[in-house]
Image: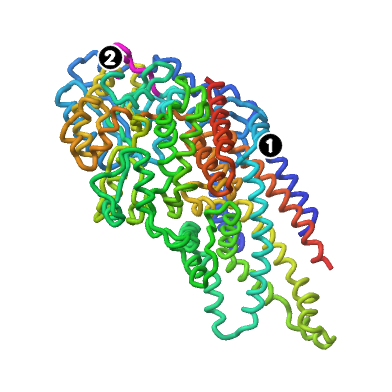
Amino acid sequence: MKLTLQRRQIIWAYIFLSVSLVFFVVIRWYPAILALGISFRDWNVFKGEGPWVGLANFQAIWEDLFKPRSSVRAAFLNTFKYVLLGVPLQLTLALGVALMLNQIRRLSGFFRAAYFVPFVTSFVAVAFVWNWLYAPQIGLINQILSALDLPTQPFLRSPKQALPSIAVVAVWRSLGFAVIIFLAGLQQIPEMYYEAAKIAGANRWQMFRHVTLPLLNPVIVYLAVLQTIQFLRMFDLVQNMSTDNAGGPLKSTTTVVLEVYKEGFSSYNMGYAAALTIILFLVIMVITLLQMRVLSRRIEY
Amino acid sequence: MSKSRIALFVALLIATLLVVVACASPTPTPEAKPSEPTEAPPQPTPTPESEAPPEPIEIEYWQYNFGARVDAMNKLIEMFEAENPDIKIIHNSDIPYDNYRDKIAASVPAGVGPDVATLFYGWQPAWIDAGYIVPLPEDQFPPDMVVKEFSPMVQASFFDGTLYTLPTAVRTLALFYNKDLMEAAGLDPEKPPATLKELEEQAVQCTKRNGDEFEVYGFIVNPAGQAHHWFREVLLRQYGQQPYSDDYRQVLWNASEGGYEAWNQFLKFETELETGRRDFESDPDGFLAGKVCFHIDGSFRLGTIAKKAPDLNFGVTELPEHNGVKSTFGSYWTHGITTKAAADPARLEAAIKFLKFITSPEAGRIWVDMVGELPAQLEAADDPDLLEDPKLGAFVAGLSYARSTFFVDESKDRQAIIDAYDAVVLNGADPAQELDIAVQTVQELLDKFWAEH
């Protein structure tokens, strides 16, 4: 059978796609499915495959949630705090920056790059630089504070300030990404809507409120979903910004993923760690579906 | 986004989950298998070599990759093979530290791993549990001999009274002191603190503050560093309270007034004497930077200092004593014989010979020269040259009274102490109550561990 050019192209497309599909199946899905299996077992790294224990791991997590000083409870609460603090801050700041960047013509390329640079920087490097900025005596922030005769702050050493301090870094780090997406969204909005609004006598706020915001809705939904997932999976910054007491002080910065890591790789309770992962997966799925429902309603109008 | 697509996505997801769960459940039969080979010694590895005696027997030795250890072991193997021409040792040291345990976990049950392997003493319960290593035969390694000839910390290698492993070398904790800072504070740098009281006095005198800022830190207690060991194995014992019951089933940190006193002593430097605060990124940084007068650390830190702060003018002395009690925390890498070796009498015999050789005082002497770790054998450690060594001497002196902790989960045990310390120091919680909570947390770990054994 003779293949037409178009057909051959399609076949090649599938061949190339299958390469990445293999990657996804082998590197992403297969381990994820295995993790589900492990969550129903009493699995110790050393012993290898352990006995089937049904829901015992999930039950253990449930019981741990109500113990005094529970790491798991702290992890879930903190994770939600990161989301509630980080996502709104991230979106508001990014929208503000994007609106301003959209106005300027001069040096706009430079500014965009400047905002985007942190996003391409390694999380670990970011964490270490901020560690030093936050450091108690020698840190830049505290040096500025004491130069201004303001009281110095413990930041990462304080159970109260540590979580917001880390959340701010997470926001800063992926601000550039959100800005770029917002910019793309802003440039999609046809100029004629604004002209029409102007003719109708709308002021700047009204234009923003009734033209920009509704038309940006798909972008906002996309970013809200994506950033929520990011914050729910918070790990590297916390691990690297609370160096010899990961998740501390006093469990005030720990996250679900960090607990997964600790349970799995320093206590070797793979079953428990896998069960936590499954719960986090379900939480992420439910929140994402809810967000898509609630937030995307308005596009249809 | 359309609703039908979301619905389709959810449906697919649920379907996948169901398939997975369904697939996973009928497998409980094969899961029992990996542990079986360990219980059934006769492995199908009969070598035809037994018919030809002149052929040397080959056994494998594994350790993780660490330059100096590899060189030292190569030298020991060379000497051993010269003495035992009928045994050949294959030395596998290519595995990075991070993968070492995984490799062991994958190979030993398959019967292809090491005959003799090196492991951290804290891993012993897990390795014994998993059936990787076998008890050392009592006729070859009499427990009395081990108790008498090895540093007391090696008792951590007895599991329910049975000896499983033996080390070549061990490490202990001691007190590092910065001579320049001591001198600047008007202290005699040749007379570092010998008792807790002196440590308190000298640390206070050495501390230099400018308002809320520290210019010089006298002494920082960092439970996330080595200090949690100092509390468990040193302070508690000095206040007359052993840290755990002899069978390691009970946490005794708060079992007596002495326990609470030790805890208060631990907290006192930061809360009351204000000789320091945990301002540095990680525990040794402040001492390396020349900002801290006194610092508790292990012999392994000497290498770090030589590399990163070669000009630091410092000395090392034994940990301060109290109530006439000296104590220090010891830890070690140790060697065990695997089930693979135990499956074949000829290999087992070779493995025993090899293990005896690498745990001899002679091996310990070579090890301290090449690696810088202390000999585990008291005879080798009793070397006047070593005791006189200005840096190693204090660590060596600690060998005769060093203790190792039997950890069921070191990171959680440590975390309990860190959290209790933080709750008091950062949140002003009641010290006694926090100690009780830490004890309860660790007791739960022990209960869980023993319930499964």
Location of mark 2 (residue)? B140
Q: At 54% from the left edge and 40% from the top edge, which residue is drawn?
A: B420
Quarter of the image with the N terminus of chain A is bottom right
State the image quarter where residue A103 is shown: bottom right
Q: Is residue B149 left or right of residue B254?
A: left
Near-viewer residue (B164 or B238): B238
Q: Is residue B286 left or right of residue A199?
A: left
Q: Is residue B414 magenta?
A: no
Q: Is residue B145 magenta?
A: yes
Near-viewer residue (B1 or B193): B193
Q: Amino acid at mark 1?
A: Phe
Q: Secondary structure at mark 1?
A: loop
The percent position of residue A153, horizontal first and vertical second, equals 54, 61
Q: Residues within 10 Å of mark 2 (few under 14, many from 20)?
A: few
Disc 1 and disc 2 on one polypeptide chain? no
User: Bounds of the magenta span?
Assistant: B133-146
Near-viewer residue (B136 or B89): B136
The percent position of residue A121, horizontal first and vertical second, equals 49, 63
Looking at the image, is B265 positioned above or below residue A150? above
The percent position of residue B269, horizontal first and vertical second, equals 44, 46
Q: At 71% from the left edge and 53% from the top edge, which residue is drawn?
A: A288
Q: Which residue sits furthest top?
A: B139
Quarter of the image with the C terminus of chain A is bottom right
Location of mark 1 (residue)? A66
Q: Residues within 10 Å of mark 1 (few under 14, many from 20)?
A: few
State the image quarter where residue B124 is shown: top left
Looking at the image, is A11 positioned above or below residue A191? above
**Mark 2 and mark 1 in contact (Cβ < 8 Å)?**
no
Q: At 29% from the left edge and 37% from the top edge, which residue is drawn?
A: B318
Q: Is residue A273 left or right of residue B17?
A: left
